[in-house]
Image: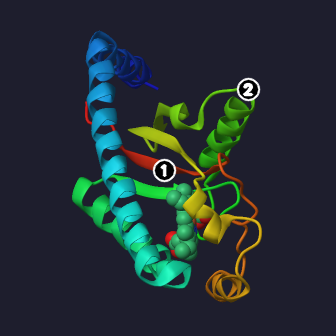
Amino acid sequence: MTTQTRLAPLLLAATAVGFAATPIQADSSPDEAVKVQLQDYKATMQAFGKTLKGELQAAMKEGGPMAAIQVCNERAPEIAANMSAESGYTLRRTSLKPRATAPTDWERAVLEDFESRKASGTPVAEIAWHNVTKVDGEKQLRFMKAIGTEGVCLNCHGQNLDPKLKAEIDRLYPNDQATGFEKGDIRGAFSITAALED
Ligand code: HEC
């Protein structure tokens, strides 16, 4: 082995250290980047929630829960997909007791943490979480926010569902776990992920 080849790994290591210094120096700006991107996440999430709830309430008023089920079944995934395409974020809703969308491992861990925060008295409306994680060398900003159960939700997520409605839910979702909720429970959470733009 020549001296040159023996030195090569050392030089590479030194270069890597040099590069590593860049993000460390810029440490205050990633914080700012997280703040800015989180604000955009929250706006996207609120728009999603508002659109969905608006369509749900309109359908409930017009045709009751049997008609509204179509909004949840078809429009909810559509709205999420459209908003994901527009924003470039991965936007979804999930739950520990899912009807359609089971959580990933990290989403499950966050949802379990949400349950313990609620159990120790934190109001559901205030329960949210975010972190920055490196996935395949890319920094991602993950964000989740708890969704509370309201009176109107009990039609389709409550304890004693109308038998016709229950049959339709079972037909559409043979593995449904999303019943038996009470008002004030955590029904699930919004989840948003994207590369961190810093
Ligand atoms: C008319 C029936 C109906 C009503 C009312 C309803 N949902 Fe749902 N919900 C559904 C259906 C159907 C799905 C599955 C949607 C899909 O296929 O993506 C669902 C899915 C969800 C999910 C996604 C996680 C999962 O379990 O797959 C959340 C969160 C959720 N609903 C919360 C709510 C909340 C909060 C309310 C009240 C504001 C509500 N729902 C009212 C029928 C309903």
Residue 94 located left or right of residue 34: right
Q: Kindly tell me whether residue 138 is visible in this rendering.
A: no
The C terminus is located in which quarter? top left
Question: Which element carries disc 1, helix, strand or loop?
Answer: strand
Beta carbon at label 1 within 8 Å of ligand 1 = yes
**Residue where numbered disc 2 is placed:** 120
Hey, what amino acid is under mark 2?
Answer: Ser
- Within 10 Å of disc 1 (Cα), the crowding (few <14, some 14-19, many 20+) is many
- Within 10 Å of disc 2 (Cα), the crowding (few <14, some 14-19, many 20+) is few
Residue 129 located left or right of residue 138: right
Q: Earlier in the sequence, mark 1 or mark 2?
A: 2
The one nearer the camera, 145 or 137, is 145
Q: Report ligand 1 position as a quadrant.
A: bottom right
Which residue is at a point 64% across and 64% down the rendered structure image?
154
Asked if residue 49 is positioned above or below residue 37 in the image, the reply reads: below
Which residue is at a point 64% across and 88% down the rendered structure image?
168
Residue 1 located left or right of residue 196: right
The one nearer the camera, 167 or 109, is 167
Color encoding of the figure:
rainbow
Q: Report x, y in % for residue 134.
A: 46, 36
Task: Give the image quarter of residue 110.
Answer: top right
Task: Give the image quarter of residue 18.
Answer: top left
Which residue is at a point 59% across and 70% down the rendered structure image?
100
Q: How many marks?
A: 2
**Residue where numbered disc 1 is placed:** 190
Hey, what amino acid is under mark 1?
Answer: Phe
Q: Report x, y in % for residue 90.
A: 39, 55
